[in-house]
Image (cartoon, grey):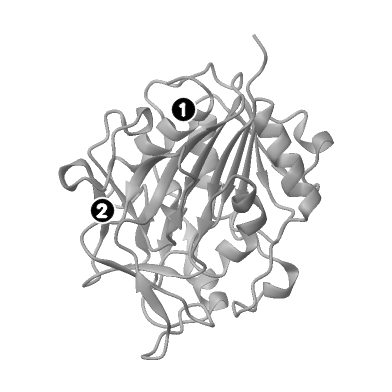
Amino acid sequence: MRRRQFLLSVASVPLVGGLVSGAAQARQQAPDPDVDTSVAKPAYPQGQGPRLAIDGGHNNFHTVDGRFAPFAAVARADGYRVSGLTAPLSAASLADIDLLVVANPLAAVNVGNWNLPTPGAYTAEEAAAVKAWVEAGGALLLIADHMPFPGGAEPLAKAFGFDFDNGFAQKAGGGPEFFQRADGSLLDHPIARGIDRVQSFTGSSFRAPPQARPLMVLRGGWSVAMPQKAWAFDDETPRHDGEGLLRGAALSVGKGRVVAMGEAAMFTAQVAGPQKRKMGFNAPTAPQNKAFLLNVLRWLSGEI
């Protein structure tokens, strides 16, 4: 049986109160050093599972030893072999990787400058290499969070037919972003097996190709704000209806698999602001987020 390969691409910076700059957002968020990253029943023997590399070569907001360290710790506890990767994405750099995490990519022009325009962080050659790799049996988890990250991730998203809004998908009335079976916002799929509710923490919306299976749908009144600058909203900010757009979807591509997500904080564990508010699978309101993370990895690896 040939080895299955995986690629995860991630982009997320959740809302942490007020209209603040991207740099301020970065300062307000840190990995939770006390979070429980254990896994009761690992999918693989310790250190013998698929090789997982987290991209650190595209001005990534989340890295293996940074804000995505809790994600990496959960993956290790499930048996995955985790490392970082700084090389450009190519047939050669992907050849010896089983699972690649690309977290919050940004073009160089947007480092410290979360304003439009937000060009892609990947070359056409990199996007083509990833697509060919997935079609041959790899798997991609593509998470493009709120603006400016959908711009950075666009070359990878477009390669698989996903169309992300480079903005902020906002729930009517604010409040926690719950996706649950009870209201039809969390849909039936092996990834949702055993899960009744997951929570996200401010992200983007997207449209998927027709052959994709929706996982998480914006229901209950959503709009999408499209600001010129991240977190800067006023009465002139363009908005469109978000109801029915997606926050998550799964797709089979050739011999490979893709999961696209519009929010990444839900897959890690951070503390935010002076009060060290828990945000991610460490949040008391998100007790099933870690199980959802494991289901995503295991579906991509063919374990479920």
Residues 191 and 43: in front is: 191
Asked if disc 1 and disc 2 are in contact, CB closer than 8 Å, the reply is no
Query: Looking at the figure, which quarter contains the C terminus?
Result: top left
The residue sitting at 41% across, 71% down in the picture is: 273
> What residue did someone put label 1 on?
299
Please indicate whether residue 238 sits to the left or right of residue 102 in the image: left
Where in the figure is residue 292, as x and y percent of width and height? 37, 37
Of mark 1 and mark 2, the one earlier in the sequence is 2
- Residue lying farthest bottom? 235
Up-down: is 103 above or below 191?
A: below
- Residue count near mark 2 (Cα–Cα under 10 Å), binned few <14, some 14–19, many ≥20: many
**Alpha carbons under labels 1 and 2: distance apart:** 22 Å
Residues 61 and 10: in front is: 10
- Residue lying farthest left? 182
Looking at numbered disc 1 in the image, what kind of residue is underneath it? Answer: Trp
The residue sitting at 61% across, 52% down in the picture is: 158
Please indicate whether residue 120 sits to the left or right of residue 32 in the image: right
- Residue lying farthest front? 210
Looking at numbered disc 2 in the image, what kind of residue is underneath it? Answer: Phe
Residue 86 visible in the current orientation: no
For residue 178, the mark is 2
Where in the figure is residue 9, as x and y percent of width and height? 59, 47
Residue 69 visible in the current orientation: yes
- Label total for image: 2
Q: Quadrant of residue 243?
A: bottom left
Label 1, secondary structure: give it.
helix
The residue sitting at 53% across, 51% down in the picture is: 162
Where in the figure is residue 206, as x and y percent of width and height? 45, 56
Up-down: is 274 above or below 56?
A: below
Where in the figure is residue 289, as x and y percent of width and height? 34, 43
